[in-house]
């Protein structure tokens, strides 16, 4: 019989694989393919910058719900929990996760619409300096977010 704990573990794993896996794809495949080539916004949309943010938010919600469920009952007293190395690492993980949520909010509310809208409209058209600046910032935020995700994966590898 399938238990709630097993389901929570499955959806937790599915959510972080989807989120971090998509970030790795964006960073290793999509960004180098697009990088400053003046690709028109229709293609950027097709390549998924706007769509990706919906999956990121869905993953954040699933991770929060399943993570909280898995954490629930792990500690009776907060003071005792934070004295253990497990508790310290878990709190570090949650703090890094909150930073990722903040960066995701900046990227999805600020850049996800503006990048396709302000990208060069025709193939071969030069991107404006403002667009290139925005694109660089978008790439930096995404890189930091991916680095935080990888640190969390490392924390979970050494937590026990
Ligand atoms: C980017 C976000 C996150 C990533 C990459 C991540 C990753 C992981 C990984 C790799 C595991 C171990 C594999 C497993 O047992 O499923 C795990 C377990 C766990 N996660 Fe997360 N997680 C994230 C967010 C969260 C959040 C927000 C919470 C709490 C609110 C949370 C709480 C837990 C708990 C309690 C466990 C079980 C640990 C244990 O077995 O003792 N996670 N997570």
Image (cartoon, rainbow, N blue to C red):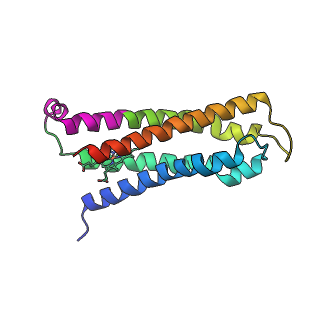
Is residue 148 left or right of 109 when viewed as pictured? left
- Residue 2 lies, in percent from the top left, at 26, 68
Range of the magenta residues?
A: 77-95
Q: Is residue 82 visible?
A: yes
Image quadrant in which you'd find residue 99: top left
Residue closer to the observer: 132 or 9:
132
Residue, x 53% and y 49% (percent of image)? 24
Residue closer to the observer: 128 or 55:
128
Residue, x 34% and y 37% (percent of image)? 94
- Residue 142 lies, in percent from the top left, at 55, 38
Indicate whether 56 appears above or below 115: below
Q: Is residue 68 visible?
A: no
The residue positioned farthest toward the bottom in the image shown? 1
- Residue 76 lies, in percent from the top left, at 13, 38
* Residue 63 is one of the magenta-drawn residues: no
Residue, x 40% and y 38% (percent of image)? 97
Main SS class of the magenta portion in the image: helix
Quadrant in which the N terminus appears? bottom left
Is residue 81 left or right of 34 when viewed as pictured? left
């Amino acid at each position: 019989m399938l238990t709630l704990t097993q389901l929570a573990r499955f959806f937790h794993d599915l959510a972080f694989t989807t989120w971090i896996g998509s970030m790795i794809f964006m960073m290793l495949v999509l960004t180098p393919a697009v990088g400053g080539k003046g690709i028109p916004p229709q293609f950027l949309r097709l390549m998924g910058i706007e769509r990706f943010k919906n999956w990121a938010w869905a993953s954040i919600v699933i991770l929060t719900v399943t993570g909280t469920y898995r954490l629930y009952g792990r500690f009776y007293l907060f003071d005792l929990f934070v004295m253990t190395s497990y508790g310290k690492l878990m709190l570090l993980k949650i703090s890094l996760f909150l930073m990722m949520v903040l960066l995701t909010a900046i990227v999805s509310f600020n850049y996800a619409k503006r990048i396709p809208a302000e990208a060069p409209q025709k193939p071969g058209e030069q991107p404006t300096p403002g667009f290139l600046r925005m694109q660089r910032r978008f790439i930096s935020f995404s890189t930091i977010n991916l680095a935080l995700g990888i640190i969390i994966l490392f924390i979970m590898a050494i937590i026990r």
